[in-house]
Image: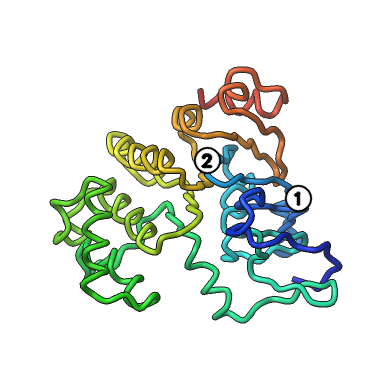
Amino acid sequence: MSEQTTAPAGAPAARDASVPMVRAEHVSKSFGSNEVLKDISLEVKRGEVLCLVGPSGSGKSTFLRCINHLEQVSSGRLAVDGQLVGYREAGGRLHEMHPKEIAKQRRDIGMVFQRFNLFPHMTALENVMEAPTQVKGLSKAKAKARALELLARVGLAERADYYPAHLSGGQQQRVAIARALAMDPKLMLFDEPTSALDPELVGEVLDVMKELAKTGMTMVVVTHEMGFAREVADTLVFMDGGVVVETGDPREVLANPQHQRTKAFLSKVL
């Protein structure tokens, strides 16, 4: 990302509840000549669930990956909990952080992908314990107690000693959610977490996400599950062609979309 003139960043939100958990200001992202995100500005309030919907290739997953700096923004600025992600500001310009500093920021941002990415040689319990012990330096006893608590929370207390190959896709995804929660994140990102699952397994993962939302966890979810968005989301954002086309209360947007592109998309998925 090239250096650019910027405005002052907000104070860390841990000390100021008025600061959004996520703030994107004029974010753009290009891969070569392909501009995938075009001037995206949006906010996710603390404790809010925001669902991103839209056709494939609309930029939803790319935007999600920019939030934790898995992708660098090409221009604009992205802050989580009042702090710029991946960059520090000096002299009115942005400078990319050292990879170790970026990795430290990511500890506070949990992410669940389409594919479960579990370590196949580790049990469910060991998968959930791994990051707290290796990254946070938690003792194995404390990490095990926390992992067992989280596996019970996602309904897998009886599967703690199972290896991923002996778990269904839905169970593996629930382990992945428990693994992300084991780092005690302030923000959870979900990138189409049910898209790789057989239809009959989708509900068990969505149920875990619903319960997580009830605890007040701030969540940004890329999804095609419109029922989930209607029931759980505080805000629905429809993206197409790299831009935010429409945003609002999910029940209102889904029942009465205002833009033709939104109407055309929803007519195919509802």
Q: Mark 1 or mark 2, which has the lower sequence index?
A: 1
Q: Which residue is drawn at 57% across and 28% down?
A: 250
Report crowding for label 1: few under 14, some 14 to 19, many 20 or more residues within 10 A (C-alpha). some
At 41% from the left edge and 60% from the top edge, which residue is drawn? 184
From the viewer's perspective, is residue 177 above or below residue 211? below
Q: Nearer the viewer, mark 1 or mark 2?
A: 2
Q: Could you say which quadrant of the image residue 160 lies in? A: bottom left
Give the left or right position of residue 5, taking residue 258 as reference.
right
In what element is the residue under mark 1?
Answer: strand
> Which residue occupies 52% across, 67% down?
106
User: Any mark on residue 77, and which?
Assistant: none
- Quadrant where the N terminus sits is bottom right
Relative to 206, say whether 120 is above or below.
below
Tag 2's secondary structure?
strand
User: In terms of image quadrants, where is residue 147?
Assistant: bottom left
On the image, numbered disc 1 is attached to which residue? Answer: 38
Relative to the observer, which residue lies in front, 11 or 65?
Answer: 11
The local crowd at label 2, few if under 14, some if 14 to 19, many if 20 or more residues have their Cα within 10 Å, is many
Q: Where is residue 105 in the image (x, y as percent from the top left)?
A: 55, 69
